[in-house]
Image: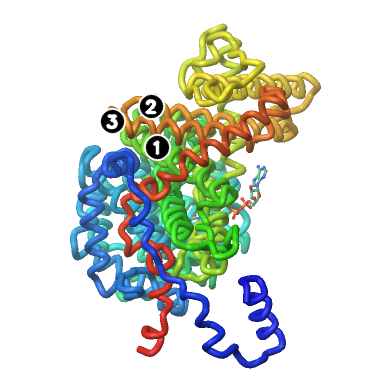
Amino acid sequence: MDRISRRAQVLNNHLTQSPPPTVSSLQRSPCLAFSPPELTEKAHFDTAELRKLTDGHNIQDRDWLYGLMVQSKLFNPRVLGGRVFISPNYNQSMEQQREMTMRRILFLLERGVFEGWLTGKGIEAEMRKFAFLEVVGMFDHSLAIKIGVHFFLWGGAIQFFGTKRHHDKWLRDTESYAVKGCFAMTELGHGSNVRGIETITTYDSNTGEFIINTPCESAQKYWIGGAANHATHTVAFSQLNIDGTNQGVHAFIVQIRDKDGSICPSIRIADCGHKTGLNGVDNGRIWFDNVRIPRENLLNSVADVSPDGHYLSSIKDPDQRFAAFLAPLTSGRVTIAVSSVYSSKIGMAIAIRYALSRRAFSVAPNEPEVLLLDYPSHQRRLLPLLAKTYAMSFSANYLKTLYMNRTPELIKTIHVVSSAFKAALTWHNMRTLQECREACGGQGLKTENHVGHFKSEFDVQLTFEGDNNVLMQQISKALFAEYVNAKKRNKPFKGLGLEHMNGPSPVIPSQLSSHTLRNKQFQMDAFCLRERDLLAQFAEEVLKLQSQGQSKENAFMLSYQIAEDLGRAFSDRAILKNFIQVEESATDEPLKGILALLRSMYALVIMEEDPAFLRYGYLSTTNATSLRKEILVLCKEMRPHALALVDSFGIPAALLSPIAFNWVDSNAWSPVQH
Ligand SMILES: Cc1cc2nc3c(=O)[nH]c(=O)nc-3n(C[C@H](O)[C@H](O)[C@H](O)COP(=O)(O)OP(=O)(O)OC[C@H]3O[C@@H](n4cnc5c(N)ncnc54)[C@H](O)[C@@H]3O)c2cc1C
């Protein structure tokens, strides 16, 4: 019986529920055996060196923490196909998942993982903190978020919005989890629009206390991570009303639970309930019923209220005050952007390893079935995403470095770049996970295989700490301001990477050869051309609408299509620039070669995918066709490096999944019996 008729027979049996075929008819076909891709795939460059470039820092610390998690029963180790895998048990109830998250945090605390996270000084301490957060996020997004809320949001608010009196009182206790913090900014009625929140705070000079109140249901605090079960304190964001004047949004420390975990008087807390992902985080809702707190609980780095009730701030303009106030929150966007890349890396490593051991269909009778990754279509689906993941990874490292070296002059740049990368990297992650899920077929849907499940675990990254669409608008607005400023003052562009606009406009050759397409100068020229033209178009449209009587905000709203194109152009150009810098820093020739290949793949795929290149004529249709063909050639060239490229991520096997290894053994009958 040939393969097709045998398959038809199996399907027919299945549909008609006939008894299974006799053993003798099956014996003709040899059973599939797993063959490790390492047997046939060899690395042609130094994978350890590439890992150094992608992880960027604290490699030993990362490996130590991987080891700690793998060896602890708390991280739910399971042996499948002769290997240990660790992953939370997502079959547990929401309450059980939350308790496990807290228990894991206490375990990490005991092992010294959080030492210096708030009290440590210098870039080294910060880098170690970032590395550890990235590692725990690869095990479980809930664990990283619960830790992130406590250290980066609550702790970050104390550090950056507070002053010495707050630092002395709260930072050490936060680092030791003597207090458990949460961050209450979002309300039912206002999320992206923070300035619109309705919680209101007044001051009582007779007692020296602030009074925080939730005046209506839409003002209830919503989605507050940690509030439903564990947090003892929160930073509450509220309008501050002094003598009938609204001074805008300010932040206050409020105790919400006592030492026994009972909810404090005048506080009401409810659960946000089950979510599509991230159920290990206890998101809650909070109502403040005229809660009284000491005057000192105002986080007063930007503004204060004197004991006799006078509002004091060195920044008079409320817009500037608000901006200065929120600027330190960038760290949340940085950690989200970076964590999304690690999730993409896991998805890619699993899907590519599976595609290097899974076969489907033979091209000719009696020939072995074809390895998934030997199908050009499978290469086309996965390898461009792999190149993009590298590009995103280098940019995530750049973002961290930019953030570490922050100065007051860099605040605007950090805001714009972190917004751009947070949106680009998290969108990339969702797309990557979806493609990896499909590339793994039905196996991609098994929770233990991560790729499908991660979509719902990481989806929220597109929304919190700045909704991606709203962030893209903010980027365009910032670029518009730069543009108008430079033109008005007749000054060259400086900062945000816009210096390329000072030179003449690049010219794209009418015929694009393979050589030109792979040339980094050409790639950069094409990206710069798109960005400068879109920025000029956007500015022209906004200014025209304003001259026709529209307000600036309306003009921005009406020009949203170009704004979106521009936001993307800015992000892509910045990502390419970082890639080129990493490539130029590499000294090893084979590594340089592979980086050049990845960079070309990244650049050409972006040009192919963004309709703006064709829409605005930066590429002719002929050139677009040449480019499309070149991508297939690049796929072919990347194919032999696929395993080495995912190995270079340095992710321990325990954090991948059974289908990345011996998926026949891991699905064998014997473990079922036991
Ligand atoms: C799991 C989870 C955990 C969270 N944890 C916390 C936490 O610990 N603390 C906290 O304070 N918050 C938290 N949040 C809240 C989160 O930050 C908000 O959900 C986010 O800011 C978006 O607000 P929103 O949900 O009200 O959406 P909205 O702001 O209502 O946005 C809805 C849609 O409208 C679009 N939109 C909004 N404004 C515009 C505009 N100007 N132009 C065009 N389109 C627009 C957006 O793009 C979006 O698609 C959490 C949220 C979730 C889901």
Q: Is residue 150 visible?
A: no
First along the sequence among labels 3 and 1: 1
Q: Is residue 538 above or below residue 453?
A: above
Furthest residue toward right: 548
Where is residue 141 drawn, in percent x and y? 42, 60
Residue mark closest to the camera, 3 vs 2: 3
First along the sequence among labels 1 and 2: 1
Which residue carries the number 2 mark?
581
Give the amino acid at mark 3. Answer: Asp
Where is residue 237 drawn, in percent x and y? 48, 51
Q: Secondary structure at mark 2?
A: helix
The local crowd at label 2, few if under 14, some if 14 to 19, many if 20 or more residues have their Cα within 10 Å, is: few
Q: Secondary structure at mark 3?
A: loop
The local crowd at label 3, few if under 14, some if 14 to 19, many if 20 or more residues have their Cα within 10 Å, is: few
Which residue carries the number 3 mark?
588
- The residue that appears at 51% across and 76% down in the rendered structure is 29
Which residue carries the number 1 mark?
394
Residue mark closest to the camera, 3 vs 1: 3
Give the amino acid at mark 2. Answer: Gln
First along the sequence among labels 3 and 2: 2
